[in-house]
Amino acid sequence: MEFEEFAAKFRERTAARMLEFEATLERIQQDVEKKAALDEERETQNAARAGQNQTGTAPASPREGVTSSSAAQRVHRPVRSVLRRD
């Protein structure tokens, strides 16, 4: 009986840690998505300003205006529970 009790408590602790981990992961994902949206908005505003102030000069840096193809192709999906039993 002692081992069964230990095993049950172990499963409960593990499940609680996973729920906490998933909640933290979801919160971090939301923060990253908010930051990405803000960065995209700033980039759009900067591009609009650059278009208004453009005098025909070359960009200040060779990578200016270049976006990462992997960042552009990234898909945001909600965090999914792996160990939770329904």
Image (spheres, rainbow, N blue to C red):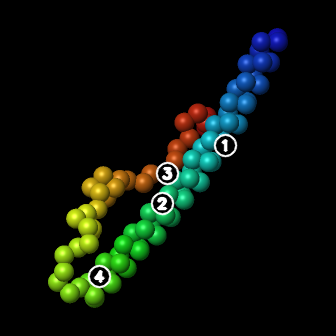
Residue holding disc 3 = 78
Residue holding disc 4 = 50
Q: Amino acid at mark 2?
A: Glu
Q: Residue furthest right?
A: 2
Helix, strand, or loop for circle 1? helix
Helix, strand, or loop for circle 4? helix
Marks 2,3: beta carbons within 8 A: no
Q: Is residue 78 visible?
A: yes
Q: Nearer the viewer, mark 1 or mark 3?
A: 1
Separation of residues labelled 2 and 3 (CA atoms): 11 Å
The numbered mark, 1 or 3, whose residue comes first in the sequence reads 1
The numbered mark, 2 or 4, whose residue comes first in the sequence reads 2
Q: x, y percentage for residue 4?
A: 77, 15
Q: Amino acid at mark 1?
A: Glu
Marks 2,4: beta carbons within 8 A: no
Relative to the observer, which residue lies in front, 36 or 16?
36
Q: Residues within 10 Å of mark 3 (few under 14, many from 20)?
A: few
The numbered mark, 2 or 1, whose residue comes first in the sequence reads 1
Q: x, y percentage for residue 83?
A: 58, 33
Q: x, y percentage for residue 60?
A: 26, 72
Separation of residues labelled 2 and 4 (CA atoms): 25 Å
Task: State the residue at coordinates (70%, 37%).
Answer: 16
Helix, strand, or loop for circle 2? helix
Residue holding disc 2 = 33
